[in-house]
Image (cartoon, grey):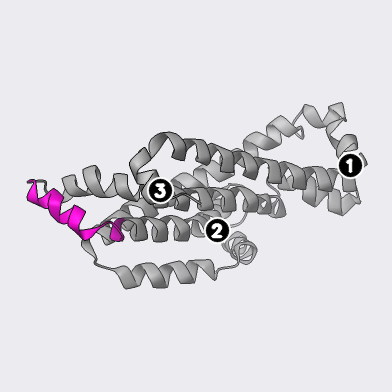
Amino acid sequence: MNWLIDFFGDPANWSGPDGIPTRLLEHLEFSVLSLLLAMLIALPLGLWIGHTGKGALFVVLSANAARALPTLGLLVLIVLLMGVGTIIPVLIPLVALAIPPILVNTYEGIRGVDPDLRAAAYGMGLRGGQVLGRVLVPVALPLILLGLRIAAIQVVSTAAVAAYVGLGGFGRYVIDGLATKDFPRTFGGAVLVALLALVVQLGFGLVERFSVSPGVRQRQPIH
């Protein structure tokens, strides 16, 4: 507890380029960009595969392959190939980390919709895209949001690896603290990462509560 008081009670940690607000913005930049890129790739792919049933094997194989990738090892490899100076080497492993939960949950959510509900939508005269957008996505929304939540928490928790290649974010406190044996700094950085992950968890909980219809929520309780 004294380490936390030392870290958070030090005014120097709340201003300047090494202050908590600046490091928070850097950490959010890595995390938000990575999550958006992963969503652009995985959401349309998961919707299409879940709706058409084509390429299901691709989902399983690609998700398993991406999960097997060591984030830090991939980061080091990309830095060796591309060098440092931009945030691209950090974004690539974080995007690879975020894609599997989004892709798999979106695919499973769409695929798991009651076939009778799907048939009824077609019977009402809706076409493929309309069935997907008006019927399948609302019913599958709890699972889709669960995938996004898992991906966001994983990205926020892992974005600290940016500090290994000289970039900022909360990982800077952890790496610098370990290098200088400044344990309050190391502990404070770890706590900040955990708090940000908790905020993300709570934020997605609110999004789920207000975006998922009560009827769907009762049938598919969100974990």
Disc 2 to disc 3, how far (Cα)? 26 Å
Q: Which corner quadrant of the image does residue 114 belong to? A: bottom left
Q: Is residue 112 above or below residue 15?
A: below
Tell me which amino acid carries mark 3.
Pro
Give me the residue at 49% from left, 66% from top.
66
Looking at the image, which is closer to me, 53 or 211?
211
Disc 3 to disc 1, how far (Cα)? 38 Å
Task: Answer few, some or many: residues within 10 Å of disc 2's Cα (few below 14, many 20 plus, some between 14 and 19).
Answer: many
Report the side of 46 relative to 52 (left or right): right
Q: Which mark is residue 93?
A: 2
Quadrant of the drawing holding the N terminus:
top right
Task: Answer few, some or many: residues within 10 Å of disc 3's Cα (few below 14, many 20 plus, some between 14 and 19).
Answer: many
Find disc 3 in the rendering and name its residue: 142
Label 1 sits on a secondary structure element that is: loop
Tell how many labels.
3
Residue 24 at x, y = what percent?
67, 36
Find disc 1 in the rendering and name its residue: 1
Q: Which corner quadrant of the image does residue 203 belong to? A: top right
